[in-house]
Image (cartoon, rainbow, N blue to C red):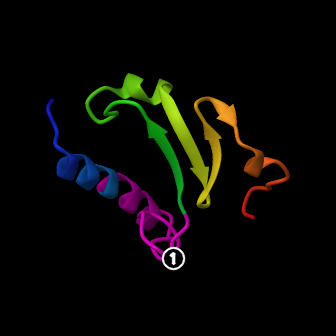
Amino acid sequence: MDMNWDQTATLAQLVTGAAAKAIGLPNVTGALIPGLEADVLVVRGNAAENICCITRTEAVYISGHEVARDRRITSEVRGMHPGS
């Protein structure tokens, strides 16, 4: 399956937005827009085309804070608690 950026972004929005609505949190999370909470996994490749790409992690962000890059925990995560 060949997907362009717009199709991949639409797929991600449908999946995350639907999940947020299903648990009653569409005004809290479910999209990458200012004011909403989000955790993001940045991978090398296109996970929509090849799910194995999720094993090639480039960076991880929790609540807008970078907590890992190139498979190393960043100093920012030290002392961070879930939900903070």
Residue 55 rendering spot, x and y as whole percentages: 49, 24
Classify residue 55 as left or right of residue 4: right
Q: Which residue is drawn at 80% across and 56% down?
A: 81
Q: Residue at x 24, y 55 (%)?
A: 10
Please give the range of residues in magenta. Answer: 14-37
Q: Residue at x 58, y 50 (%)?
A: 61
Q: In this view, does 25 lie above or below 80?
A: below
Q: In this view, does 7 lie above or below 26?
A: above
Name of the residue lying farthest toward the right? 79
| Rendering quarter of residue 16 | bottom left
Residue 17 forms part of the magenta stretch: yes
* Residue topped by disc 1: 35
**Residue flagged by tag 1: what amino acid is it?**
Gly
Q: Residue at x 48, y 77 (%)?
A: 27
Classify residue 83 as left or right of residue 59: right
Residue 36 forms part of the magenta stretch: yes
| Rendering quarter of residue 21 | bottom left
Q: Is mark 1 on a helix, strand or loop?
A: loop
